[in-house]
Amino acid sequence: AQSVTQLDSQVPVFEEAPVELRCNYSSSVSVYLFWYVQYPNQGLQLLLKYLSGSTLVESINGFEAEFNKSQTSFHLRKPSVHISDTAEYFCAVTPRNSGNTPLVFGKGTRLSVIA
Amino acid sequence: GAVVSQHPSRVICKSGTSVKIECRSLDFQATTMFWYRQFPKQSLMLMATSNEGSKATYEQGVEKDKFLINHASLTLSTLTVTSAHPEDSSFYICSARGQGGNTGELFFGEGSRLTVL
C-alpha cells in the first residue's frame, strides 16, 4: 500500500516570494507521482507529474517538483508566487502500471498568497 | 487533456430523498472511474472504484446500499445517494483513467456539492 504525507497543512507566503510545499511518500513498489491543485468549489486539476526520466518536472505556470527517490520526496516549488496561486495543493501517488489502482492523496496544503 | 464532466455541480435536497450524480468522460472512453468524497478542508477519500460492465468495488466503511454506483457505458458512471441525510452532505468528485492509460494519471470532474437539509 502507498501513503502520502504533506507535512504542512497551511503555508502563507507573500506575493513574489518563493515557496516550497513538501510531500513525502511511502511505497514498497515503484510509483508515479502527481501534484494536483484545487480552487474553491472546483475539482482537481493536474499541475504536474513524474512518470520516469528526468527527476525535475515543470508545469506551464512556473511550478516545478523534484523526485528524490532516496528521500522518497516530491516537493513542489515556485520561485515567485502570485495571488492567483492561492489554492489547495494535493500530492498523490499510484503504483506504476497501475491499471485499476486509484490515486492515494495526501491531506493537502493550503497555499495562501498575501499581497 | 482529457475532459471529465460532472452534473449537477450543486444540489440541495431534503432528508430522505435520493440524489443522482452523473460523471461523463467527454472525449475518451473510461473503463475505470473512481468516486471520491471530500469533507470541508480535508483530503479526498476514495469511496469506490467503478468498472464498466461490472459491479463497483467499495472501500471499507462505505455503504454500498447507500451509495449506488452504476457504470453502464464507457463514458458514464453514476453515483446515487439513497435516502440522503445531513451527514451525507459533502463534495463528491469523480475521476477517470482512460483505456490503455498506463501513466496512472486521473482526470477529475468539477465536483458535485451535495447539501442535505
Image: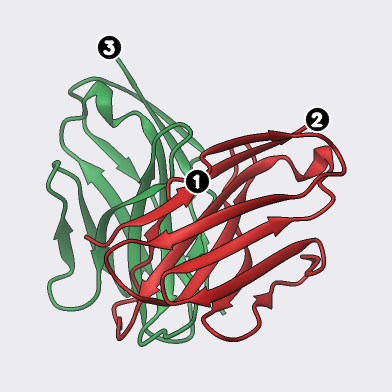
Q: Distance between the residues labelled 1 and 2?
A: 19 Å
Question: Which chain letter matches label 3?
Answer: A
Q: How far apart are marks 3 and 2 (CA)?
A: 38 Å
Mark 1 is surrounded, within 10 Å at the Cα level, by few (under 14), some (14 to 19) or many (20 or more) other residues, namely: many
Work out whether mark 1 precedes mark 2 in sequence or the reverse, and give the earlier one.
1
Q: Are marks 1 and 3 on the same chain?
A: no
Question: Going 53% across and 43% down the picture, which residue do you hit?
Answer: B8
Residue A50 lies left or right of residue B4; in this view the side is left
Mark 3 is surrounded, within 10 Å at the Cα level, by few (under 14), some (14 to 19) or many (20 or more) other residues, namely: few
Question: Which chain letter matches label 2?
Answer: B
Q: Mark 1 points at which residue?
A: B111
Amino acid under disc 1? Gly
Q: How far apart are marks 1 and 3 (CA)?
A: 29 Å
Question: Looking at the image, is mark 1 or mark 3 nearer the viewer?
Answer: 1
Amino acid under disc 2? Leu
Q: Mark 3 points at which residue?
A: A115
Q: Where is residue B43 in the image (x, y as percent from the top left)?
A: 56, 49
Q: Name the residue under label 2.
A: B117
Mark 2 is surrounded, within 10 Å at the Cα level, by few (under 14), some (14 to 19) or many (20 or more) other residues, namely: few
Residue B3 can be seen, yes or no: yes
Q: Position of residue A100 (x, y in %)?
A: 48, 82
Q: Is residue B82 above or below residue B73?
A: above
Which type of secondary structure does the marked residue at label 2 adopt? loop
